[in-house]
Image (cartoon, helix red, strand yellow):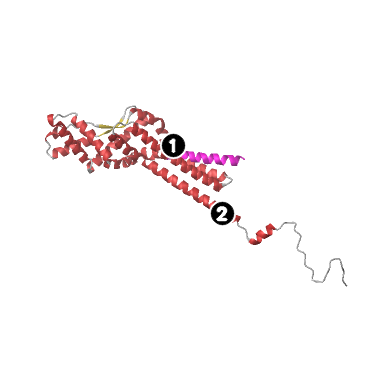
Amino acid sequence: MIRAALAPVLLVLACLLVPLATLSTWAAYEIGDSDRYVSTTAPLATDPAVRNTVGDAVTTGIMRTISVGPLQSTVEQYLHDAVVSFTGTAAFQGAWNTANRAAHDAVQRALDEGGTGAVTLDLAPVTRQVKQQLLDDGVPFAAQIPVTHTEITVLSAGDLAELRKVFPVLQLAGAWPVLASLVLTVAGLLLARRRRRALVATALGMALAAAALLVALTIARSLTLGDLDTDADKATAGAVYDALTSSMRTVSWVVVGVGAAVAVVAWLTGRSWSGRRGRRSPATGAARRRPADASPVQPRSECRGAVPGRAFP
């Protein structure tokens, strides 16, 4: 009785741990690791939305401190084009990686030490490189460009406070939920009376749990972008969100696929095994169809002329 009741409980817990295991592994080993974070955000340097956002931010920062009279709008457009052009170079890739490493360290430090300010991405290295490029090209107003600390907000103070409630716990958990889910699955299957049926249910449960995480990530993305004002901001935030959550989505889809495949194979194998057991040989079937108390067939008399009730010498 205890065994029959304990097996489903263990298997349900194993399924419920799948989203938590995915989140904690992602938080500890991708977002929590500086090198992996930088490698994850590095491709964003070539994203058109990100490049345009960097161009807008750097151009706005420069134009805020210089004045060129009636040529203001012309110079602003020229600067914007120059910055966007620079974002396609290897130098920008290096500056982008450096800025993201600094931003990651700032976020991690704020989570660990309890910082309350917003975390920003400093674009001063980009401004410095653009200024030098314009000076090399002989642009007259290039010398007036100040190298200011133009910043893009990575994480607002409010978002940081919300993140601090759960993120350190996920990082502390690390790979333990993955191990716990595996242990519970093995224990539940060993205790189950009908293991094949339990395997099918567990595989489907894990697939559904992973699918639920995919739905949650989609909803979170929609809510994140819904708070932004312009289409450009939404495009940039969407690119960043997709890059940071890419590994979670990949792992979840793998779990969905593997879980569904295991469930189908186990179910089909069970049907095949039941069919083989149900088949009987003809001799065995005939023997089973004959009643157990049936009288044996009496041999026929060899005397053709025998009449019942009369005796012959």
Residue 242 visible in the shown view = yes
Left or right relative to 257: residue 55: left
Front-most of residues 34 and 26 = 26
For the image, the number of numbered tags is 2
The residue at 21%/39% (across/down) is: 84
Q: Quadrant of residue 176?
A: top left
Where does residue 47 sit, x and y in percent of width and height?
Answer: 28, 41
Q: Quadrant of residue 60?
A: top left
Dot 1 amino acid type: Ala
The residue at 44%/47% (across/down) is: 257
Residue 21 within the segment the image draws in magenta: yes
Tell which circle, 1 or 2, labels the residue nearer the N-terminal end: 1
Q: Which residue is mark 1?
A: 173
Q: Quadrant of residue 38?
A: top left
Front-most of residues 85 and 10 = 85
Where does residue 145 sit, x and y in percent of width and height?
Answer: 16, 32
Q: Name the disc covering residue 56, or none.
A: none
The residue at 65%/59% (across/down) is: 285
Q: Name the disc covering residue 273, or none.
A: 2
- Secondary structure under tag 1 reads helix
Left or right relative to 50: residue 175: right
Residue 129 visible in the shown view = no
Residue sticking out furthest to the bottom = 313
Q: What are the residue bounds of the magenta stretch? A: 1-24
The secondary structure that most of the magenta stretch takes on is helix
Dot 2 amino acid type: Trp
Give the CA distance from mark 1 to mark 2: 42 Å
Where does residue 98 sit, x and y in percent of width and height?
Answer: 27, 38
Query: Which image quadrant: the N terminus?
Result: top right
Mark 1 surroundings within 10 Å by alpha-carbon count, few (fewer than 14), some (14 through 19), many (20 or more): some
Residue sticking out furthest to the top = 116
